[in-house]
């Protein structure tokens, strides 16, 4: 091979258009449209496949990154909530230690339907608290004893039910 043939092959390879240049250079004619020319080109389908696979990989990679970020944020906020709960429990425990007072029974004056067994119930509650305070070494105060409301729903819930079920 002579130098002239080597230079002509190198210059021919350098002048060969790339896939994108070739795809953009299609010109419609009477025999084939631009779309028909592109579909007939074997490099067209490989470039479409590469672009499709690249797009899918980018989408799923970003989705994975977002999942990891949101998971990390969730773990961070859970740890923050645990710290706040531990601080609140420590504050309650410190406040409970400070509360030491003599045992006294105060009846609720707003209760009108007093039953004869109420005195016995109050005596049992007082005895249980006194036994607990002896075992604990502290003294507790009973500020009030109230009967639990027998309704299972709150007033707001009952009002909502009444509003939503009344006839037109």
Image (cartoon, rainbow, N blue to C red):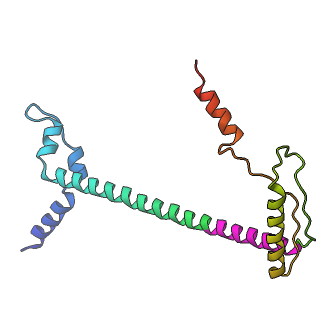
154 with respect to 127 (left or right): left
Q: Would you identify the image quadrant in which residue 125 lies?
A: bottom right
**Residue visible at 82% across and 55% down?**
118
- The vertical placement of 36 against 93, above or below, is above
Residue 97 counted in the magenta span: yes
Quarter-wise, where is residue 92 in the image? bottom right
From the image, give the main secondary structure of the stretch colored magenta.
helix
Residue 10 appearing in the image: yes
Quadrant occupied by the C terminus: top right
Instruction: Indicate the position of residue 43 as horizontal and vertical percent values.
Output: 16, 53
Q: How many marks?
A: 0
The quarter of the picture where the N terminus appears is: bottom left
Q: Name the residue: 27% across, 53% down.
A: 52
Residue 152: percent from the left, percent from the top?
A: 65, 45
For image coordinates 59% across by 28% down, the residue present is 164
Q: Residue furthest top?
A: 168
In the rendered image, residue 138, in percent from the top left (x then y), is placed at: 86, 78
Q: Position of residue 5 (x, y in %)?
A: 9, 68
**Does residue 18 appear anywhere in the picture?**
no
Write the start and end of the magenta stretch as one range. 79-98
């Amino acid at each position: 091979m002579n130098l002239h043939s080597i230079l002509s092959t190198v210059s021919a390879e350098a002048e060969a258009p790339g896939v994108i240049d070739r795809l953009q250079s299609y010109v419609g004619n009477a025999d084939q449209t631009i779309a028909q020319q592109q579909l007939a080109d074997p490099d067209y389908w490989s470039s479409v496949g590469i672009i499709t696979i690249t797009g899918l990989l980018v989408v799923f990679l970003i989705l994975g990154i977002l999942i990891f970020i949101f998971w990390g944020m969730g773990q961070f906020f859970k740890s923050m909530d645990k710290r706040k709960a531990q601080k609140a429990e420590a504050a309650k425990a410190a406040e409970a230690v400070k509360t030491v007072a003599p045992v006294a029974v105060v009846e609720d004056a707003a209760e009108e339907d007093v039953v004869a067994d109420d005195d016995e119930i109050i005596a049992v509650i007082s005895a249980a608290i006194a036994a607990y305070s002896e075992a604990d070494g502290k003294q507790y105060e009973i500020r009030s004893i109230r009967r639990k409301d027998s309704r299972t729903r709150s007033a707001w819930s009952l009002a909502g039910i009444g509003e939503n079920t009344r006839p037109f």
